[in-house]
Image (cartoon, rainbow, N blue to C red):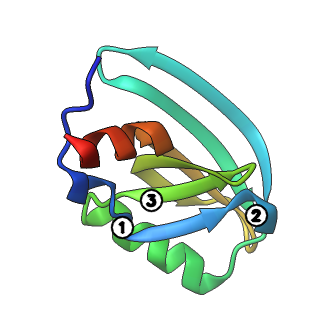
Amino acid sequence: MQASHPASYFTPQLELSLDDHKIDDGWIGGGREGTTFAFTLGPVSEATVAALSDVAQKRGTICLYCCHQPLFFDPVAVKRKDLQRVRIVGRIVGGASDALRTMIL
């Protein structure tokens, strides 16, 4: 299936790396809305929580680097779990191969 998003869709408003954070309580699922997932991320600063919340409110895109590979997702919900952790629920919109294929088209 060809990616249907314009190349600018894959310009993230925020980038995060799993190298800098610990992930807990993750899950992934699929359905009519696409592939969704949730995880708890920490430790995070107040600035990171504010940036995540801002992107979620503006319905922006986040690039999460996992093993140096980008995963693009739209945050659906961002909720503070405690002082240093945040719960993120998101919808996957593409990875590196999707972004490159879209830019070439």
Q: Which of marks 3 and 1 is nearer the N terminus?
A: 1
Q: Which of 9 and 101 is in front in this view?
A: 101
Residue under label 3: 62
Mark 3 neighbour class, 10 Å CA radius: few under 14, some 14 to 19, many 20 or more: many
Residues at marks 2 and 3, CA–CA distance in whole angstroms: 16 Å
Residue at horizontal 37 percent and vertical 70 percent from the top: 13
How far across and down, in percent of the image, does residue 25 sit? 75, 38
Image quadrant assignment for residue 9 = bottom left
**Proximity of marks 3 and 1: CB atoms separated by less than 8 Å:** yes
Disc 2 designates what residue? 42
Residue 14 x, y percent position in the rendering: 46, 70
- Secondary structure state at the residue bearing disc 2: strand
Numbered disc in front, either 3 or 1:
3
Which residue is drawn at the image coordinates 79% and 62% (left, top)?
A: 19
Q: Pick whichever, 44 or 103, lies toward us.
A: 103
Q: In this view, does 33 lie to the left or right of 95?
A: left
What is the distance, in whole Å, between disc 3 and disc 1 at their CAs?
Answer: 8 Å
Residue visible at 78% across and 70% down in the picture: 43
Q: Quadrant of residue 49?
A: bottom right
Please, what secondary structure does the residue beneath circle 1 have? helix
Marks 1 and 2, the one that precedes in the sequence? 2
Q: How far apart are marks 1 and 2 (CA)?
A: 18 Å
Query: Residue at position x 48%, y 45% from top?
Result: 96
x, y (%) of residue 84?
Answer: 75, 72
Question: What element does badge 3 sit on?
Answer: strand
- Asked if residue 91 can be seen in this view, the reply is no
Identify whether 36 is placed above or below 68.
above
Q: In this rendering, is residue 95 above or below 31? A: below
Mark 2, Cα crowd under 10 Å, few <14 / some 14-19 / many 20+, is some
Q: Mark 1 points at which residue?
A: 55
Q: Position of residue 39 (x, y in %)?
A: 65, 43
